[in-house]
């Protein structure tokens, strides 16, 4: 079954300028998909269309078996958690704690349980020391951590992350990446749509969709996308760090082409020492 199914979707902010231009794709339940593309390629527009914040000019969006329309929008929003690109748009409460709790409050969760969930997710994103602080006084990266905690705490079927770690430093990005990979392992039916221009984030996903000027210029499984590095470069993307390390090792006679991830590689390297 597909968690998200998009058919011939087109969106124009202004007459005859297509921010999304007749795109179609399917995302099966439980997959981890990245949408990558340069600034202005239509990524955020697509995220807003999927959550019904923007209404398409033409085409169809289906979330599980529900067609996105006025009747189904509430049910659909309950299934999708979105972290938007600019975290400021996502804060309404006066404390970090209330902000993480905000989405949960609409879901009839008992208040003790709710506090437990809030603290748990604040810890997961390393923001538990800030629970009583005002969100407006946090740094951009800290705001992103809080926004991510608030959405992950909802336990939605689909999570959409729109450049959700763009303001974090490399270590912070890596922590969130690990958190998402872990959540995915704990809940295999969770569907993740990660919108990013960070190739390292995209490298973690099973399937990649590349957008340019509102069109899908390439989509494919992880292996297909990352086996053609020249093409990726032509499209404006760097080679992921993990592949670069493997290439450099190969130049020195060490072939680790069968390693699937950094942990595998570290383990094999350690065995050599
Ligand atoms: P991305 O998230 O990939 O950077 P966006 O979806 O934000 O791209 O933007 C896609 C295109 O739509 C861009 O050309 C952008 O200028 C235009 N656009 C985005 N938001 C608006 C808006 N509110 N009004 C008019 N044009 C917009
Ligand atoms: Mg964007």
Image (tube, rainbow, N blue to C red):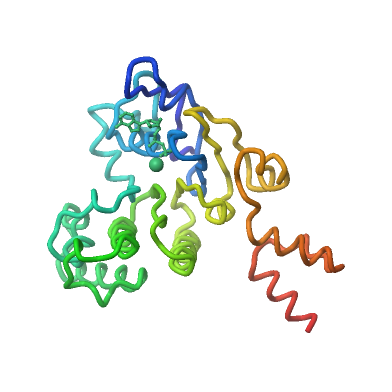
- State whether residue 201 is above or below residue 65: below
Question: Seen in the image, is 59 located left or right of residue 247?
Answer: left
Report x, y in % for residue 128.
27, 75
Report x, y in % for residue 49.
34, 33
Ligand 2 quadrant in view: top left
Q: Residue furthest top?
A: 16
Depth check: 25 or 176 in front? 176
Name the image quarter holding residue 243.
Answer: bottom right
- State whether residue 89 is above or below residue 139: above
Name the image quarter holding residue 103.
Answer: bottom left
Q: The C terminus lies in which quarter of the figure?
A: bottom right
Q: Residue at x 37, y 24 (%)?
A: 11
Q: Residue at x 72, y 46 (%)?
A: 227
Q: Residue at x 20, y 70 (%)?
A: 115
Depth check: 41 or 195 in front? 41
Report x, y in % for residue 175.
46, 68
Q: Count every numbered label the image shows and give the total.
A: 0
Question: Seen in the image, is 54 located left or right of residue 192?
Answer: left
Report x, y in % for residue 71.
23, 28
- State whether residue 12 is above or below residue 111: above
Question: Seen in the image, is 188 located left or right of residue 87?
Answer: right
Q: Residue furthest left?
A: 94
Q: Residue furthest right?
A: 253
Depth check: 119 or 172 in front? 172
- State whether residue 103 is above or below residue 12: below
């Amino acid at each position: 079954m597909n968690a998200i199914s998009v058919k011939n979707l087109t969106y124009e902010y202004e007459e005859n300028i297509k921010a999304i231009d007749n795109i179609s794709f399917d995302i099966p339940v439980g997959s981890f998909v990245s949408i990558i593309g340069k600034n202005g390629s239509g990524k955020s527009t697509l995220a807003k269309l999927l959550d019904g914040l923007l209404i398409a000019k033409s085409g169809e969006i289906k979330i599980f078996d529900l067609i996105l329309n006025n009747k189904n929008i509430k049910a659909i929003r309950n299934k999708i958690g979105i972290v938007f690109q600019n975290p400021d748009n996502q804060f309404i409460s006066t404390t970090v704690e209330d902000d993480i709790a905000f989405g949960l409050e609409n879901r009839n969760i008992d208040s003790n349980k709710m506090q437990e969930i809030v603290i748990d997710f604040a810890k997961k994103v390393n923001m538990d020391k800030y629970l009583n602080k005002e969100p407006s006084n946090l740094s951009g990266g800290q705001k992103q951590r809080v926004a991510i905690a608030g959405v992950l705490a909802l336990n939605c079927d689909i999570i959409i992350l729109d450049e959700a770690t763009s303001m974090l430093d490399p270590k912070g990005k890596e922590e969130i990446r690990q958190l998402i990979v872990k959540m995915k392992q704990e809940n295999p039916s969770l569907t993740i749509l990660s919108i990013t221009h960070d190739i390292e984030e995209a490298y973690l996903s099973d399937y990649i969709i590349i957008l340019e000027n509102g069109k899908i210029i390439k989509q494919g499984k992880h292996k297909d996308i990352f086996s053609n590095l020249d093409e990726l470069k032509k499209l404006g993307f760097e080679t992921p760090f993990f592949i670069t390390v493997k290439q450099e090792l190969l130049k020195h006679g060490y072939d680790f082409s069968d390693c699937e991830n950094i942990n595998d590689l570290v383990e094999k390297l350690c065995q050599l020492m």
